[in-house]
């Protein structure tokens, strides 16, 4: 049963307060920790040195330098997150080459290399938390907004692996794999208390405790609470006396709470996290009433895992993870005279086993298996008062996959990667995902990569089985997987002075794309495999980091994604994306000024277009002020650009939703 909004907010506030007080008492009773060894100061290193220590785990399920990964890799560090004032994963991802983000005032959606279907739930991206899959089991949804599993202040780094990776990870590793790595307890060495205030009546607080004990147990416990009133908004599409003259007042609220616990000792590690978010919707969803505060959605995701990881010197490694999760969604839509409710529940457990073994001096073999039991999947739609059931669908299914990848040093500067994975699903049988890569490193400053691969996305439970007469949806259990075939050439070179240039040219062929269509036989909406698209593009980048002074990067993406049948550009597919990031100390002080900007060219919608726009954010970050405080202030959309994002017309009855203008956030973090 879902807790009423006021009750769970009160309970969350009480829980946060209790954790904060308990943590403070614990620190007060804790003896002064022994001095720690000096950490590596990456701020004093040039770009080439940074690349040498820039370790990525998600590329081959083992630690590698980023330039040795068979992909175009980006890494976002904890320092960048703090200095640029990023609030969400969406804020971070929109700064990377080839990425852009859309928002429908409920969720944020990732676009990669010119492809983003409005409202596709990010199911073509695999999102990991410390290597654990977070895409839930009903919609395959990957959270990148405020509803993401952990507070961004607890992120150590974000690894972004572009291109199809189903050869290692199976379904959803379609366009990219994103692995969020959290900070260890030792990085806190005590308690952190963070508070922030932002535009639209938004306030949040976080209390975290981390420590490495004398018995080598590393522990981190953190809780976050946030509540926001949201904007009062105007929608010209609803400017009539019957719909409040287009004004939505107080209906855009958002509140969430998050918990994270991680512990590690020796070869064993444990993590558990929980997030619950309630979001008000100021615009009608599924033709509900405009500006009605009863229309809202509630998302909850809980994950837990126990892992064993052992490395055998330089000869290989073995790891296994037992994990479980629960996802729930409740949508309440206001109609006249009552409401309609949409509920979804997914529960699962799984077991992953990975191993790596060095064969002689020229081969490194990685292999493993994955099993997942989705033992409960419920989707139901009903009117609560008077009670009227429109649909109730209950499913369960299991899936498994096995994979192997061989890394072969053909010659001193030339390495071959060859891998394949076989997945077995109930309903459509097996899927085979191969990939191959050549990495040529003629000198320490230059790297070339030639990549080819095939990946798939299995249809999710929502697409397969959801049906309800209330919003005229019907099921299609005969859906098949989508596939992508990708080829890419990457070049990276250090040119001196702490600068690196990069270029990537790619082509993607997508087949069996799932799209929601109106069936003319019964006028019901149904998901079908009806699409095929081709995408080509070029991404250019320049990064500068001399270890001091001005640091930044500039990227330019040129891309075209078309429907093969018609030759027309896909909706929500910009032809050009430009990103700029700059940060620098102010007059030799410890205060850092940071600026990031993104230009997105025109995007087509179903009936028109969303014009081009440029977003600019500016941030100031002052670390260890008065010895204990981190202070930051950020202005988002600095120049108040007016723009809208394409959205799913079948859900909202309109194809563009206007986004926020200028807003701000100030934050303080106390370390003790």
Image (cartoon, grey):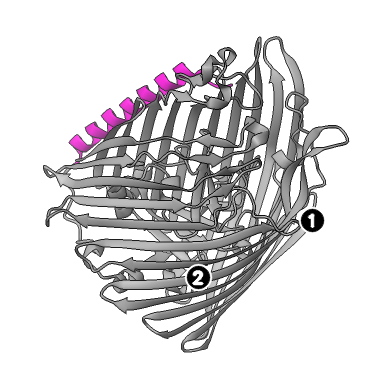
Residue drawn at 28 percent across, 50 percent down: 83
Q: Secondary structure at mark 2?
A: strand
State the extent of the magenta-drawn residues as a range. Answer: 1-30
Q: Quadrant of residue 391?
A: top right
In-image side of 355 versus 33 (left or right): right
Count of numbered badges drawn on the protein: 2
Q: Secondary structure at mark 1?
A: strand
Q: Quadrant of the C terminus?
A: top left
Relative image position of residue 27 (x, y in whole percent) = 22, 37
Mainly helix, strand or loop, the magenta region?
helix
Q: Earlier in the sequence, mark 1 or mark 2?
A: 1
Q: Quadrant of residue 640?
A: top left
Q: Which residue is mark 1?
A: 429
Relative image position of residue 167 (x, y in whole percent) = 63, 65
Q: Nearer the viewer, residue 69 or 207?
A: 69
Q: Quadrant of the N terminus?
A: top right
Q: Nearer the viewer, residue 466 or 583?
A: 583
Residue drawn at 36 percent across, 81 percent down: 445
Q: Nearer the viewer, residue 361 or 448?
A: 448
Q: Is residue 11 magenta?
A: yes
In-image side of 547 versus 279 (left or right): left
In-image side of 535 versus 99 (left or right): right
Q: Is residue 109 magenta?
A: no
Q: Which residue is mark 2?
A: 504
In-image side of 34 versus 606 (left or right): left
- Label 1 Cα neighbours within 10 Å, binned few <14 / some 14-19 / many ≥20: few
Alpha carbon of mark 1 to alpha carbon of mark 2: how far?
A: 35 Å
Relative image position of residue 185 (x, y in whole percent) = 32, 48
């Amino acid at each position: 049963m879902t807790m009423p909004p006021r009750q769970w907010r009160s309970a969350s506030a009480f829980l946060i307060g209790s954790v904060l007080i308990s943590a403070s008492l614990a620190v007060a009773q804790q003896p002064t920790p022994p001095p720690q060894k000096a950490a590596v100061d990456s701020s004093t290193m040039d770009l080439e040195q940074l690349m040498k220590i820039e370790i990525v785990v998600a590329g081959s399920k083992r630690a590698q330098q980023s330039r040795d990964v068979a992909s175009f890799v980006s890494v976002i560090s904890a320092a960048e997150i703090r200095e640029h004032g990023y609030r969400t994963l969406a804020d971070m991802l929109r700064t990377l080459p080839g990425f852009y983000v859309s928002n429908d005032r409920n969720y944020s959606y990732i676009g990669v290399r010119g492809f983003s279907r409005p409202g596709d739930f990010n199911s073509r991206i695999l999102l990991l938390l410390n290597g654990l899959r977070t895409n839930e089991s009903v919609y395959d949804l990957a959270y990148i907004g405020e509803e993401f599993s952990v507070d961004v202040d607890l992120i150590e780094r974000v690894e972004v692996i572009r291109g199809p990776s189903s050869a290692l990870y199976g379904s959803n590793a379609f366009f990219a794999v994103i692995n969020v790595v959290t900070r260890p307890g030792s990085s806190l060495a005590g308690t952190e208390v963070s508070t922030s205030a932002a535009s639209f009546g938004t306030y949040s607080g976080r209390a975290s405790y981390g420590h490495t004990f004398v018995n080598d147990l590393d522990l981190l416990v953190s809780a976050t609470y946030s509540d926001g009133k949201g904007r009062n908004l105007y929608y010209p599409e609803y400017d009539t006396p019957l719909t409040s003259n287009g004004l939505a007042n107080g209906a855009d609220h958002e509140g969430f709470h998050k918990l994270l616990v991680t512990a590690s000792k020796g070869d064993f590690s444990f993590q558990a996290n929980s997030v619950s978010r309630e979001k008000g919707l100021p615009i009608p969803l599924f033709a509900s009433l405009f500006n009605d505060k009863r229309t809202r959605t509630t998302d909850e995701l809980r994950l837990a895992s126990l892992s064993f990881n052992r490395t055998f010197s330089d000869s290989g490694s073995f790891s296994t993870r037992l994990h479980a999760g629960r996802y729930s969604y409740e949508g309440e839509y206001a109609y006249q005279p009552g409401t309609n409710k949409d509920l979804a529940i997914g529960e699962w457990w799984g077991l992953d086993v990975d191993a790596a073994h060095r064969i002689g001096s020229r081969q490194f073999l990685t292999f493993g298996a994955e099993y997942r039991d989705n033992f409960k999947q419920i989707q139901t739609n009903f009117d609560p008062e008077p009670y009227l059931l429109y649909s109730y669908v209950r499913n369960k299914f299991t899936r498994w996959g096995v994979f192997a990848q061989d890394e072969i040093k053909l010659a001193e500067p030339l390495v071959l990667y060859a891998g394949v994975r076989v997945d077995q699903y109930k309903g459509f049988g097996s899927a085979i995902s191969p990939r191959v890569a050549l990495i040529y490193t003629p000198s320490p400053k230059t790297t070339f990569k030639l990549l080819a691969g095939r990946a798939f996305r299995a249809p999710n439970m929502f697409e397969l089985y959801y049906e309800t007469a209330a919003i005229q949806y019907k099921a299609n259990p005969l859906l098949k997987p989508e596939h992508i075939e990708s080829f890419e050439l990457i070049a990276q070179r250090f040119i001196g002075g702490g600068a690196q240039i990069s270029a990537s040219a790619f082509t993607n062929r997508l087949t069996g794309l799932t799209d929601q269509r109106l069936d003319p036989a019964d006028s019901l909406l149904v998901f079908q495999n009806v699409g095929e698209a081709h995408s080509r593009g070029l991404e250019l980048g320049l990064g500068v980091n001399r270890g001091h002074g001005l640091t930044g990067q500039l990227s330019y993406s040129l891309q075209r994604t078309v429907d093969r049948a018609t030759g027309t550009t896909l909706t929500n597919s910009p032809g050009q994306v430009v990103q700029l990031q700059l940060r620098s100390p102010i007059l030799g002080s410890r205060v850092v000024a940071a600026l990031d900007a993104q230009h997105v060219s025109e995007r087509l919608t179903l009936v028109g277009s969303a014009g081009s726009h440029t977003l600019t954010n500016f941030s100031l970050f002052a670390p260890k002020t008065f010895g204990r405080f981190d202070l930051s202030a950020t202005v988002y959309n600095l120049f108040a650009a007016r723009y809208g994002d394409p959205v799913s017309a079948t859900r909202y009855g309109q194809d563009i939703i206007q986004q926020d203008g200028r807003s701000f956030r100030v934050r303080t973090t106390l370390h003790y």
